[in-house]
Amino acid sequence: MKLYDESIKTLLSGLDLTRATKMDIVNTNWEDVGDHNLILRSDMAYELGGGTNPAVSAMAVTCQDDFVNTDEVLLLGPDLKDIKEDHPYARIAIVKVAEDSLGDGNALYNAIRKIEYVRYHINPKGYMTRISAKQGREPVRVSAEALKEGLGFAQVGKLFIDTYHENKNIEAVKLIFITDPAFDYKALAEQAKHLEDITGTIDHIFKNVMMDCGSCSLQKICDEVEGLRELHFAVH
């Protein structure tokens, strides 16, 4: 599973994680309210990624310990209690799986999508994610009441980590929240799209019998990403 590794390396090189706060998730618990996590505008303190603010989400899968070897939640920027109004936001998940644990063929694509879809099944009390996969946005409404009760990224991150680990293929997760107003969210959004393009190309390979790479709209991705072209010709 090296399909995302070069992109992960590029993504991490754009983050100064020496400035990041490592959140304490060992002694942290918070309620997941499931489908009942509706936060009305009148009840929210602010929205992460609200209005014209960026709301970026990126996910990549790897087998490399160099990228992630233990569960951790990192924060670049202010925590939830220190934010007072609509604010830029990003969430990055780098997920480590065991080598060859995701299978091949269409099973590989489905396994990656299953990991990605974890985000649809996490509902921390007072933290309502409003995902728009089509627009590539993941804004979040944060309730004023939850902030009073002590909600922070440690609590949110712990629920993410726990839910990821419901998938037996996942060994560790590096979760990075970004709220730094000075961060280059535009560049991160482009990197997130590239990661999604890689996943989409995997699906294309297993559903499309096209062998004329010169006329394929995904040729650039295949040329750039180690393993994709080999995957293509292994299938056909």
Image (cartoon, helix red, strand yellow):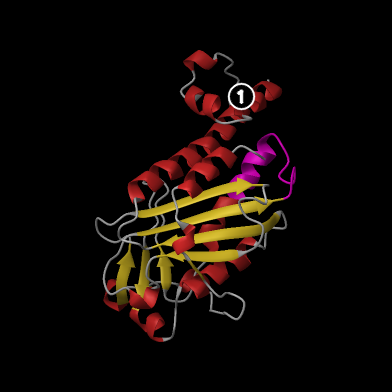
Which stretch is magenta? Answer: 98-114
Residue at x 61% of width, y 24% of height: 229
Q: Residue at x 59, y 33 (%)?
A: 202
Q: Nearer the viewer, residue 87 or 187?
A: 187
Q: Amino acid at mark 1?
A: Arg
Q: Quadrant of residue 158?
A: bottom right
Q: Residue at x 36, y 46 (%)?
A: 135
Q: Which residue is mark 1?
A: 229
Nearer the observer, 102 or 92: 92
124 relative position to 146: left or right = right
Q: Position of residue 226 (x, y in %)?
A: 60, 30
Tell me where residue 72 sits by quadrant. Answer: bottom right
Residue 138 visible in the displayed image: yes
Percent from the top left, x then y, of residue 153? 47, 71
For the view shown, which residue lies furthest in the front direction? 18
Q: Position of residue 27 (x, y in %)?
A: 60, 81
Q: Quick check: is 113 in the magenta stretch?
A: yes
At x 26% / y 71%, what residue is drawn? 85
| Whether residue 26 is situated above or below residue 57 in the rendered picture | below
Asked if the stretch drawn in magenta spans residue 32, the answer is: no
Query: Is 227 rendered above or below residue 76?
Result: above
Specify the quadrant that holds the C terminus: top right
> Mark 1 packing: few (<14 Cα in 10 Å), some, or many (20+)?
some
Residue 105 drawn at (x, y percent): 69, 34
Residue 33 showing in the rendered view: no
